[in-house]
């Protein structure tokens, strides 16, 4: 059993999910969408009418870009609490990722969370358009770290979902499962061992203190393990653990065959991902006018100042 600090490699942890990712929903056929009411609450809008104006501007921008707004802004109704247990039907939208991006581009730029949202949806929209290799081209080490850390946060959640379907259920199960992946990749080292080698405090996450090369190796381990669990329909936690160990060993052997540095011997960066994200937030705050943010941008981990909205938001019409 591992007693290392909790990583976002376990069951999806709310403290390591972007507030925008946290309110993302999926339809029965697997299509993602965001509720406009939820998005308004995350962005700090108390009056729905003000937020609806931003939606209307976004719809016009969508139409002017040559796309059909109906493909991105699906008007629906939602039951909202009005006090004393009563509920009433209010207007809402099911938004695509692109719709969210347009809304935030047209939202109040004085709100810090709006600047963060512009960054988040710009990155996510860009990820859908180009490959990782294209995104990483031309980025410096810190920029690569920010991008890969966001990717790893996403894929670790997907890996945990696949592991859960294979029988990995409890917190202890997840700790053991992810330790097997680390042991394969790091020559027998568990998460706690890696944490100690990096001389980190208990509250610090090892993933936030990895360089781009180390993050990329862990990203490959996570994606390949998830695919193998699903492809081979692994159905027990012992098999899941063995699979994670095996994939980690294969990635390690590949690094060795290519003459690369073993991950446990890679240097620990001076700045953590949290520090790099804080610098990015300060850069965004200094902007005097709203504009489309350009890569490089930070990943999906939640800003410590952002307050996520629950799935059932209060009435914004009040």
Image (cartoon, rainbow, N blue to C red):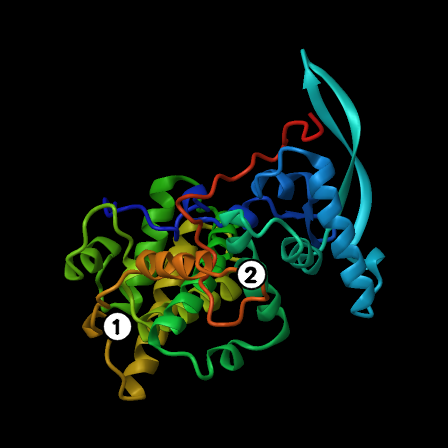
Res. 263 mark: 1
Q: Is residue 143 left or right of residue 260?
A: right
Residue at image coords 59%, 44%: 23
**Residue 57 position in % (x across, y down):** 76, 54
Find numbered disc 1 in the image and state the secondary structure of the residue it sits on.
helix
Q: Quadrant of residue 208?
A: bottom left
**Residue 300 position in % (x across, y down):** 47, 56
Q: Can residue 231 be seen in this snapshot? A: no
Q: Is residue 225 left or right of residue 176?
A: right
The 10 Å Cα crowd at callout 2, few under 14, some 14 to 19, many 20 or more, is: few
Q: Is residue 4 left or right of residue 73?
A: left
Q: Quadrant of residue 22?
A: top right
Residue at image coords 51%, 76%: 132
Find numbered disc 2 in the image and state the secondary structure of the residue it sits on.
loop
| Viewer-nearest residue: 133 or 86 | 86
Residue at image coords 40%, 73%: 144
Of pointers 2 and 1, the one earlier in the residue sequence: 1
Task: Name the residue tied to disc 2.
Answer: 289
**Residue 129 position in % (x across, y down):** 63, 73
Res. 193 mark: none
């Amino acid at each position: 059993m591992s007693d290392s600090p909790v990583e976002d490699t376990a069951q999806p942890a709310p403290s390591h999910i972007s507030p925008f990712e946290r309110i993302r929903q999926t339809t029965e056929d697997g299509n993602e969408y965001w509720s406009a009411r939820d998005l308004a609450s995350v962005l700090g809008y108390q009056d729905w009418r003000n937020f609806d104006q931003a939606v209307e501007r976004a719809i016009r921008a969508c139409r002017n870009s040559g796309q059909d707004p109906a493909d991105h802004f699906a008007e629906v109704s939602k039951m909202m609490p009005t006090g004393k247990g009563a509920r009433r039907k209010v207007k809402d939208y099911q938004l695509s990722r692109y719709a969210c991006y347009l809304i935030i581009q047209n939202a109040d730029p004085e709100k810090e969370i709006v600047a963060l949202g512009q960054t988040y949806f710009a990155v996510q929209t860009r990820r859908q358009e180009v490959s990782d290799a294209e995104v990483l081209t031309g980025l410096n080490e810190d920029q690569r770290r920010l991008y890969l850390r966001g990717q790893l946060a996403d894929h670790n959640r997907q890996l945990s979902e696949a592991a859960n379907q294979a029988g990995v259920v409890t917190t202890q199960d997840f700790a053991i499962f992810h330790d097997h992946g680390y042991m394969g990749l790091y020559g027998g080292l568990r998460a706690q061992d890696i944490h100690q080698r990096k001389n980190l405090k208990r509250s610090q996450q090892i993933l936030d203190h990895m360089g781009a090369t180390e993050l990329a190796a862990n990203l490959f381990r996570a994606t390949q393990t998830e695919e193998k669990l699903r492809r081979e329909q692994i159905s027990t936690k012992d098999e899941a653990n063995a699979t994670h160990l095996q994939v980690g060993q294969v990635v390690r052997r590949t690094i060795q065959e290519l003459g690369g540095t073993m991950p446990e011997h890679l240097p620990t960066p001076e700045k953590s991902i949290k520090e790099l994200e804080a610098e990015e937030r300060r850069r965004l705050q200094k902007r005097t006018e709203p504009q489309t943010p350009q890569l490089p941008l930070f990943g999906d981990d939640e800003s410590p100042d952002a307050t996520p909205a629950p799935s059932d938001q209060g009435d914004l019409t009040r």
